[in-house]
């Protein structure tokens, strides 16, 4: 026989014997097994959340206007309109930011003429 065939045959026999030896050992459970302790039921307990001290005056007021072709959500803080979210009937929602508002952050994509460039959400965390 050729040496490669002999080596392959011996490797196959060795692998088969090792698998058989492992299967014989795994069928017998260890003799000193002990049951695991019971875990306490934590499903009904809710963790206490820390108070972050958020100012309720800074919470945005959202006005929703339903139309035939789109839904418009206006976001205001202290009565100042800073963002509009337009949800069309067909297509993805987009946002319009008020760059003159002191509440919202200015966006570099806005034109100097005061026209707000539509922004689409690319990824949400």
Image (cartoon, helix red, strand yellow):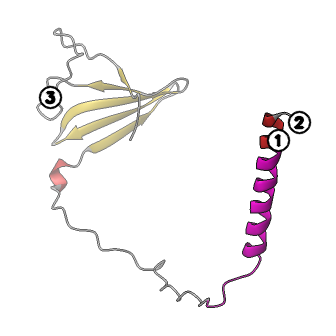
Residue plotted at (79% across, 36% down): 3
Question: Where does the magenta region start and end?
Answer: 9-32
User: In the picture provided, is 95 more to the left or to the right than 76?
Assistant: right
Residue 10 forms part of the magenta stretch: yes
Quadrant of the rendering where the N terminus is positioned: top right
Q: Secondary structure at mark 3?
A: loop
User: In the picture provided, is 92 more to the left or to the right than 3?
Assistant: left
Residue corresponding to mark 1: 6
The residue mark sitting in front, 1 or 3, is 1
Quadrant of the rendering where the C terminus is positioned: top left
Q: Nearer the viewer, residue 64 or 56?
A: 56
**Mark 2: few, some, or many residues within 10 Å (few <14, many ≥20)?**
few
Residue corresponding to mark 3: 101
Residue 26 in the image, given as x and y percentages of width and height: 73, 73
Residue plotted at (76% across, 48% down): 11
Residue 117 in the image, given as x and y percentages of width and height: 30, 16
The residue mark sitting in front, 3 or 2, is 2
Q: Secondary structure at mark 1?
A: helix
Residue corresponding to mark 2: 1
Q: Nearer the viewer, residue 80 or 118?
A: 118
> From mark 1 to mark 3, how far is it between C-alphas?
83 Å
- For marks 1 and 2, the one nearer the N-term is 2
**Mark 3: few, some, or many residues within 10 Å (few <14, many ≥20)?**
some
Tags 1 and 2 in contact by the CB under 8 Å rule? yes
- For marks 3 and 2, the one nearer the N-term is 2
Q: Secondary structure at mark 2?
A: loop
């Amino acid at each position: 026989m050729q040496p490669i065939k002999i080596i392959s045959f011996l490797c196959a026999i060795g692998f088969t014997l090792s698998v058989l030896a492992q299967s014989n050992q795994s069928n017998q459970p260890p003799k000193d097994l002990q049951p695991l302790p019971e875990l306490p039921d934590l499903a009904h307990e809710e963790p206490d959340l820390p108070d972050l001290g958020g100012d309720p005056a800074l919470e945005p007021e959202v006005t929703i206007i339903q139309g035939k072709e789109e839904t418009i959500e206006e976001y205001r803080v202290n009565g100042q309109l800073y963002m509009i979210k337009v949800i069309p009937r067909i297509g993805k929602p987009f946002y319009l930011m008020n760059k003159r508002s002191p509440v919202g952050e200015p966006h570099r994509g806005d034109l100097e003429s005061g026209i707000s460039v539509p922004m689409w959400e690319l990824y949400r965390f």
